[in-house]
Image (tube, grey):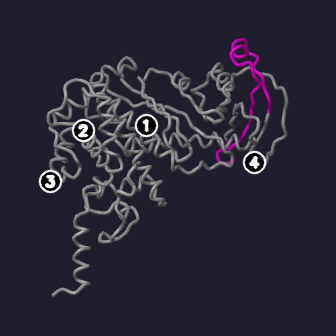
Amino acid sequence: MSSPQTIEKQKGNQALSHHNTVFSQLLKLIPRHEFETLAKQHHSGRSFRTASRWSQFVSMAMAQLSGRNSLRDIVENISAQAHRLYHLGSSRLSRSNLSRINDGKPYALYEALFGKLLSRCQGMVPGHNFRFKNPLYSLDASTIDLCLSVFPWADFRTTKGAIKLHIGLNHAGYLPEFVTVTEGKNHDVTVGRTLAFPKGSIVAIDKGYNDYAWYKQLTDKEIFFVTRLKTNAAYRTVSRQPVLKNKGLTCDQTIEFTGTQTARKCPVQLRRIGYRDAETGKHYVFLTNNFKLSAKTIADIYKARWQVELFFKWIKQNLKIKSFVGTSKNAVMTQIWIALCIYLLLAFLKFQSKLQKSTQQILRLLQLNLFEKRELIALLRGDPPDSRQPNINQMVLL
């Protein structure tokens, strides 16, 4: 007759042996009913017989997390895990089926899913690293090169194709709050004008967004901007403020534009701040419509704009948005929006688990253990494989 301790140990071992895979637990962070509602809203063409949008998402999400580079690679990897597809709520797709869905079914589903995931992540983000309370954004765009002969719809130059990913990165949690994907020929500021930043927010932009009429519009909407002044800008100095030269500041002036066109487009007083970087010795001249923050804070805001560059670098190095498994515009957009959804899932795990791991560390742990039967939170915490932890359902996005 077994002792109570032995029976309890056997029950524990049985419970542990029935853990779903790490990948399955990750997908449970997306409420299935909500996904299916979005799928119905963004469906076109015939209804599915055996395939589904969920199966497409499972396959493409697996490709993003495990670094698969082709349809054959994706399908073969999924096929190797066929006995676990039931727990994922997915069916196995052939290459032709997956290709057909990527090409024909609207990518708007994953754009909408991105919006849902973003709103949930926003509810738990930490604040930015500055003392002021204004929302802080960095706005920039990155070009994704494409072969024009393979992607003829992505016309950019005579012999080159490209699309452009525009990101408005919120420094609270470094979430890509504003996302737009356009043709490579679209100018950065054209997209910038369409973004509805909250009143009172501060937007850090580089000289690629130079538009004096837009500066006036932002000022009228009570949205602050921090950018660099063009070297050939014509202006007159209205007043000067003392600066702390030991902090690298060289000037703090109130200016008005005097050029015929610039004065007409931007007939408001702005602030010109000079700053010399102690590390590089390079001198910067910043332009802003914020007269309340200190000159050094304005310089630090522009320096923090580098975070959006790091975001582009991270997503290009760690997720699949440079090489594509389809050649149609819909297939490319589908892959990009699913990659952005995966980024938000990783960010959610980081915020919810409250661990000091970077997003890249979380991704590496998932890549190595994607189909292991481990408790997801225990894995992120670094607990031993046989450690008993709370059920992942406690973290379902509600």
**Which residue is under mark 1?**
115
**Which residue is under mark 4?**
247
CB-based contact (under 8 Å), mark 4 and mark 1: no
Q: Nearer the viewer, residue 165 or 13?
A: 13
Q: Nearer the viewer, mark 1 or mark 2?
A: 1
CA separation, marks 1 and 2? 19 Å
Span shown in magenta: 253-281
Question: Residue 106 placed where, x, y %?
Answer: 30, 27
CA separation, marks 2 and 3? 17 Å
Residue 99 placement: quadrant: top left
Amino acid at circle 4: Lys
Residue 98 placement: quadrant: top left
As drawn, 132 above or below 42: below
Q: Nearer the viewer, residue 295 or 193?
A: 193
**Which residue is under mark 2?**
56
Q: Specify which label sits upstream in the sequence, 2 or 4.
A: 2
Asked whether, in this view, residue 372 is left or right of residue 282, the answer is left
Q: Determine the secondary structure under disc 3.
A: helix
Q: Determine the secondary structure under disc 4.
A: helix
Asked whether, in this view, residue 130 is left or right of residue 156, the answer is right
Amino acid at circle 3: His
Q: Nearer the viewer, mark 4 or mark 3?
A: 3
